[in-house]
Image (cartoon, rainbow, N blue to C red):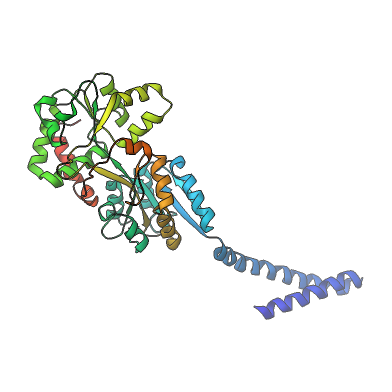
Amino acid sequence: MLLYMYDLSINLTEGFANMFFKKNLYTKIPFLFCSFKGLLGVLLISLIALPLYAAQNLQEVNLYSARKEALIKPIIDDFSEQTGIKVNLITGKADALLQRIKSEGKNTHADVFITTDAVRLYRAKSAGVLQTINSDALNNAIPDNLRDPEGYWYGLSMRARPIFYVKDSVDPNDLSTYEALADSQFKGRICIRSSNNIYNQSLLASMLAADGNDKAQQWTNDFVKNFARKPKVGDRDQIKGAASGQCDIAIANTYYYGKMLTGKKADQKKAAEAVAIFWPNQGDRGTHVNVSGAGVTKYAKNTANAQKLIEFLATKKAQRWYADVNFEYPVRKDVAASELLKNWGEFKADTINLNQLGANNAQAVKIMDRAGWK
Ligand code: FE
């Protein structure tokens, strides 16, 4: 290659010399030949060398995120600044992104998949689109139950799904466990969204693990009878329903409560202020929790950078930001919850391995269908 380049440069130099200093056409003809050869050579070298050079110098990682851009972009910008690794971010709905990774197969552009709810991470693992990560940094930072035992996915922020009660109409001493919400004293007093919602499926999946199939079925049959209204819309609407007198008790994820309390919508703030959190099952397994988390895709082209990005999201600083921006709990035990979340009180969280929620999901859905949970 070097010899060829040397030959080309000689040819080119000769060509220029001929062009400018010898005016007869005879001497220009060889130059035209030489310059054509030279140009072709330069072009060839560029074609081969430039992409190689670029590949060596352009560090990047491709992220498919089911979290909205506002909830992830600032922290990945920080990652890029600190590591020099460019993050190409694609955001979308969780199920659609997983489907996309599946259908892209070996040609997927995704190196990292970030999504909410452990069941979706479990589904990604089961679909064979993730690969294991071997990282002491992640294993040390993230508690066992909030990550896949084989290292296919890692939880990065935690949310709880407690009971919310209307302060003026419920004595918290009457509350105890999720199981107790099936008691007849709560007839017509509970607001909860539909059974096709993954958060409710995961809650029931955790109860299936704790109570067994028969008890979980009986509980669901009775619990459904206590609904104040047909299940509909989202978690915030259950809190709003409670505050407006349609029910006394609502089930919702904690971050919705945080958003309602701090958001700009006056009606939501007022509704959130009318209710308080009750942490159920503190005398036994603890309150049901879930995560948002990440995994490296099976056919990632930038595996090392993918791992670096997930490790970065588990660092103390990133945990602080990543949890706070969506009113979630850090997964790291050495990072405290934000002041707002601290106000809601400390609670014991269920320590079931979240993979179990995925494993129990189909059974949970069957139970809900049988019980007529719309
Ligand atoms: Fe949500």
The spot of residue 99 in percent (x, y) is: 35, 47
Residue 28 shows up from this direction: no
* Nearer-the-camera pick, 212 or 41: 212
308 to the left or right of 213: right
Q: Quadrant of the N terminus?
A: bottom right
The image quadrant of residue 165 is top left
The spot of residue 4 in percent (x, y) is: 68, 78
The spot of residue 2 in percent (x, y) is: 67, 79
The spot of residue 253 in percent (x, y) is: 29, 36
The image shows residue 98, relative to residue 253, as above or below, that is: below
Q: Quadrant of the C terminus?
A: top left
Residue 368 shows up from this direction: yes
281 to the left or right of 294: left
- Going 82% across and 75% down the picture, which residue do you hit? 14
Q: How many marks?
A: 0
The image quadrant of residue 279 is top left
* Nearer-the-camera pick, 285 or 359: 285
Furthest residue in direction top, as rendered: 245
